[in-house]
Image (cartoon, helix red, strand yellow):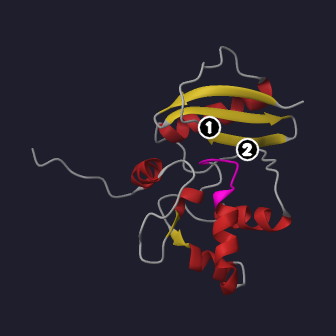
Amino acid sequence: MKQQAIIKTPLGYTRITGDENGISAVSVLNSEETISESIPESLNECVIQLREYFDGKRQKFDLKLNPQGTDFQKKVWNALLDIPYGKTTSYLKLSQTLGDVKAIRAVASANGKNPLWIIIPCHRVIGSDGSLTGYAGGLHRKQWLLEHESPVTQQSLF
C-alpha cells in the first residue's frame, strides 16, 4: 500500500509517495499543507536524503526508486540520473544521448512528466541557448535549484 508524507523544504511543501518497492513520487506543492507528524518507515530515508540535499550535504541520492511511466519515459528518466550535480544539459543533447535527435519533443515531454522531483534531476535540463525552459515546479524553483547546485559562489566584497 502506498504511503505518503508531507515535509517542508526551502522551495515549499513536498509530498513523498512510496512503499516497500521504492519511492514512486516526490512533488513540490503550490499550497500550504499539514506537515506529517510521523514519517512512514518506507519514506524515512528519502526524507533524510532530501534534507541533506537542501542543507548542501548531499549531491547524489541513493534510494530505491519506483516511478510509474512508459518504457520511453523511464529511459529518459534514467538518462537524467547521469547528469552530474552542478552541471546542465540541453534537451537536444539529451535526445542525442538517447540516440534519436528527432525525439527532442518526446524527450522534453517525458522530462516534464518526471514524478521524482529533485531526485531525478530534470531541473538540470535547459534550452540549447542556455535559457531556463519550462519546469513543472515553476521556473523560480528551477533557478533556485541550479543556483543551489552551482559550484560558483558569489563572494562578498566586504
Q: Which amino acid type is marked by label 2?
A: Leu
Q: Residues within 10 Å of mark 2 (few under 14, many from 20)?
A: few
Picture layout, residue 136 above or below residue 96:
above
Report the predominant secondary structure element of the magenta stretch. loop
Q: Residues within 10 Å of mark 1 (few under 14, many from 20)?
A: some
The question of residue 95 being in magenta is answered with: no
* Residue range highlighted in magenta: 112-118
The question of residue 113 being in magenta is answered with: yes
For mark 1, give the secondary structure: helix
Q: Is residue 86 left or right of residue 28?
A: left
Q: Which residue is mark 1?
A: 49
**Pointers 1 and 2 in contact (C-beta within 8 Å):** yes
Q: Residue at x 47, y 53 (%)?
A: 142
Q: Quadrant of the C terminus?
A: top left
In space, the residues marked 1 and 2 are separated at their CA atoms by: 9 Å
Residue 27's spot in the image, x, y percent?
A: 64, 41
Q: Quadrant of the N terminus?
A: top right
Q: Residue at x 68, y 85 (%)?
A: 102
